[in-house]
């Protein structure tokens, strides 16, 4: 037996203290998002009195910031490591949040929104890369699943606390809200941005160490391209509809009360918290592509419940049960996905391009989440809710098909189809970023 007992324990569980600090950072980041995101629209529209058009522009700029910064974020992580990039992201987000809370005109709000969105977007791939660095292949699925659970808890608690502070008739309450979020990002920088990453280690990589870099590497990787296509469809169909298309369908078509909708969203978060670690044990013994396809099947059940809710909307109690069931089923599917998507990205990425792959994945996610609500609200708002449900069900069927078609393009290890075997292999790459 070689190595110390401490080293062997870290092999089994991942690097303890840095990983804990990264997960605390994930929770802080999610708390900040839940703290203010639900109230950005009402802040611009009602509190500042700038109207819905200005509020829509603010959200558009927030989303476009991702397109501007993510290509540079990936390269920065690969060159300098995730910690410096995270610190830059937290500085941008804190500055944007603070300025947003004090801005009163449209130009200032748009600039603040860009800084805010750029900072939040920069933090995401940096945190994901830090999770990969602080975990082992055996513990990675558990680490990403725990991240997902903490993110949902953080956003839920943040929205609850933020709702107690918001007072539309008192602009100062919204200023306090965004100022507190700025402080939250500074806390993220203090807790996670100062965490010492595990020492760089040799990583065996198939292929040439001097291959293409940046986005060219992603385009050349057919497996990663297929995964990005699948991820884009997943985030468009589920996460992109969660608080937009489905919420509009529930309130406008079914007549669900806002308080009931809040109960349904709470049921989603509770489902994830209760099931997530249980799902980790289930998916640990099965192919990741099977778990992704199973998530699609569960979501088909959610869209079927939406159809039921639309057909029986005059029966208030039964329709309410159906709406709550939609969100609960979404939570089951999300719990299946959490231990799979992040680890596949990490396993596909060469060590020298880990930041680029995480940033590319985050970019696809951001675009899908930006496009999804626009499509969903447009279809529901135009009164064509049967077409909306049919389109979402068709997209979900495509998720199942693409997940299964991804399987031949992954190695058994990437698809969790074979136990990891420690072997002596030629070293092809040296991971050096701190």
Image (tube, grey):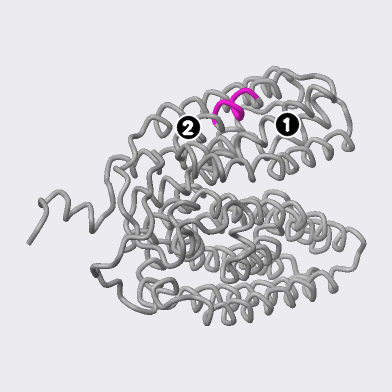
Q: Is residue 26 above or below residue 277?
A: above
Q: How far across and how far down the image is residue 250, in percent? A: 75, 60
Region in magenta: 90-95
Query: Which residue: 82% across, 54% down?
Result: 374
Question: Which of the pair 400/279 is nearer the observer?
Answer: 400
Is residue 8 shown in magenta? no
Q: Quadrant location of residue 192?
A: top left
Quadrant of the drawing holding the N terminus: bottom left
Q: Is residue 32 above or below residue 279?
A: above
Question: Dot 2 corresponds to which residue?
Answer: 84
Q: Is residue 271 visible?
A: no
Q: Quadrant location of residue 88?
A: top right
Position of residue 48 in the picture relative to residue 242 (left or right) = right
Label 1 – label 2 distance at C-alpha: 22 Å
Query: Nearer the observer, disc 1 or disc 2?
Result: 2
Q: Is residue 219 above or below residue 167?
A: below
Q: Is residue 158 visible?
A: yes
Q: Earlier in the sequence, mark 1 or mark 2?
A: 2
Query: Which residue: 60% across, 37% down?
Result: 120
Mark 2 secondary-structure assignment: helix
Q: How far across and how far down the image is residue 59, in percent? A: 77, 40
Residue at the left extreme, as displayed: 1
Residue at the right extreme, as displayed: 382
Question: Dot 1 corresponds to which residue?
Answer: 113
Position of residue 168 in the picture relative to residue 144 (left or right) = right
Q: How far across and how far down the image is residue 101, in percent? A: 69, 22
Mark 1 secondary-structure assignment: helix
Q: Is residue 143 above or below residue 23?
A: below
């Amino acid at each position: 037996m070689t190595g110390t007992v401490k080293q062997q324990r870290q092999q089994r569980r991942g690097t303890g203290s840095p990983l804990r600090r990264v997960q605390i950072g994930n929770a802080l980041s999610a708390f900040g998002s839940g703290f203010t995101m639900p109230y950005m629209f009402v802040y611009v529209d009602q509190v500042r009195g700038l109207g819905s058009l200005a509020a829509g522009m603010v959200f558009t700029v927030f989303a476009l910031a991702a397109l501007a910064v993510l290509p540079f974020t990936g390269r920065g992580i690969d060159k300098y490591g995730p910690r410096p990039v995270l610190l830059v992201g937290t500085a941008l987000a804190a500055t944007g949040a603070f300025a947003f809370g004090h801005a009163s005109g449209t130009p200032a709000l748009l600039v603040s929104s860009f800084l805010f969105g750029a900072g939040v977007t920069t933090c995401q791939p940096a945190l994901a890369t830090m999770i990969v660095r602080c975990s082992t292949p055996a513990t990675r699925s558990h680490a990403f699943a725990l991240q997902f659970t903490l993110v949902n808890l953080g956003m839920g608690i943040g929205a609850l606390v933020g709702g107690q502070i918001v007072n539309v008739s008192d602009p100062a309450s919204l200023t306090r809200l965004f100022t507190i979020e700025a402080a939250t990002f500074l806390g993220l920088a203090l807790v996670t941005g100062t965490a010492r990453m595990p020492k760089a280690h040799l990583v065996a990589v198939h292929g040439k160490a001097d291959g293409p870099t940046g986005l060219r590497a992603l385009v050349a990787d057919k497996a990663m391209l297929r995964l990005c296509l699948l991820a884009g469809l997943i985030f468009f169909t589920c996460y992109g509809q969660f608080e937009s298309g489905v919420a509009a369908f529930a309130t406008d078509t079914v007549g669900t009360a806002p308080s009931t909708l809040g109960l349904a969203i709470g049921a989603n978060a509770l489902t994830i918290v209760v099931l997530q670690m249980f799902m980790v044990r289930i998916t640990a013994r099965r192919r990741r592509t099977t778990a992704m396809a199973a998530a699609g099947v569960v979501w088909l059940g959610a869209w079927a419940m939406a159809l039921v809710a639309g057909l029986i909307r005059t029966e208030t109690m039964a329709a309410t049960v159906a709406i709550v069931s939609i969100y609960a089923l979404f939570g089951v599917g999300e719990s299946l996905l959490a231990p799979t998507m992040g680890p596949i990205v990490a396993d596909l990425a060469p060590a020298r391009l880990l930041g680029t792959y995480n940033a590319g994945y985050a970019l696809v996610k951001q675009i899908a989440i930006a496009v999804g609500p626009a499509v969903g609200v447009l279809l529901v708002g135009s009164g064509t809710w049967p077409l909306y449900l049919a389109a979402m069900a068709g997209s979900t069927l495509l998720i199942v098909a693409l997940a299964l078609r991804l399987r031949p393009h992954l190695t058994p290890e990437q698809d969790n189809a074979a136990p990891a075997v420690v072997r002596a292999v030629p070293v092809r790459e040296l991971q050096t970023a701190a």
